[in-house]
Amino acid sequence: MRRVQLKDLAHARSGDKGDTVNVGVISYRAEHYDLLVEQLTERRVKEHFGDMVKGEVKRFELPNLGALNFLLHNALGGGGTVSLMTDAQGKTFSTALLRMEVDVPEELLP
C-alpha cells in the first residue's frame, strides 16, 4: 500500500446549493472506483473538512459514472448572499477534498 492524494486518482467539482456544498468526485480509471467507495466515507470526508462543515455529510454513489457525490450541509455560513466567507459558493471545496490522502495498493497506482 502507498498513501497518495486523492487528486492522483480522481478529479472533482464543487458548488453551492444554499448553505450546502455539493462535491462530485470522479475516478480517472474504473478500477479506482471501489477504492474511492471504500475510503471516501461520509465520516472521513467530514473529518477531513473539520470545523468547516457544521452539519452532516451525505454521500451518493454513482457507479455507472465511477463517481461519488457529497453534500456538505451547513458549510457556507448561510449561503452565497448572506455569507461572509471568501468562498461563499463552495468552489474551492473540491480542491480541498482532492488533498485528502488515501491508501492505494501498489498494483492500482497510476
Image (cartoon, helix red, strand yellow):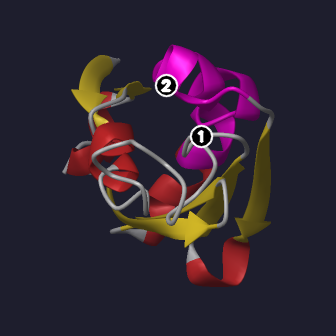
Q: Are marks 1 and 2 in contact (CB under 8 Å)?
A: yes
Residue at 24% from the left image edge and 48% from the top image edge: 7
Image side of residue 41 versus residue 11, left or right = right
Q: Residue 28 occupies which quadrant of the picture? A: bottom left
Magenta stretch: dominant SS?
Answer: helix
> Of label 1 and label 2, which has the lower sequence position?
2
Q: Is residue 108 above or below residue 27?
A: above
Question: Disc 2 marks which amino acid?
Answer: Phe
Q: Where in the figure is residue 61, as x and y percent of width and height?
A: 75, 63
Q: Residue at x 30, y 52 (%)?
A: 92
Work out whether residue 64 or residue 91 is closer to the camera in this orientation and state it.
91
Q: Is residue 53 magenta?
A: yes
Single out the mark in the foreground, 1 or 2: 1
Q: Which residue is mark 2?
A: 49
Q: Which mark is residue 75?
A: 1
Q: Amino acid at mark 1?
A: Ala
| Front-lying residue, 60 or 82 | 82
Magenta residues, start to end? 36-54
Query: Which quadrant of the figure contains the N terminus?
Result: top left
Q: Is residue 79 above or below residue 47?
A: below
Which residue is located at x 71 percent, y 73 percent?
62
Numbered disc total? 2
Tell which of 32 and 50 is nearer to you: 50
To which quarter of the image does residue 18 belong? bottom right
Give SS at disc 2: helix
x, y percent for residue 72: 66, 45
Query: From this viewpoint, which residue is outermost toward the bottom?
Result: 64
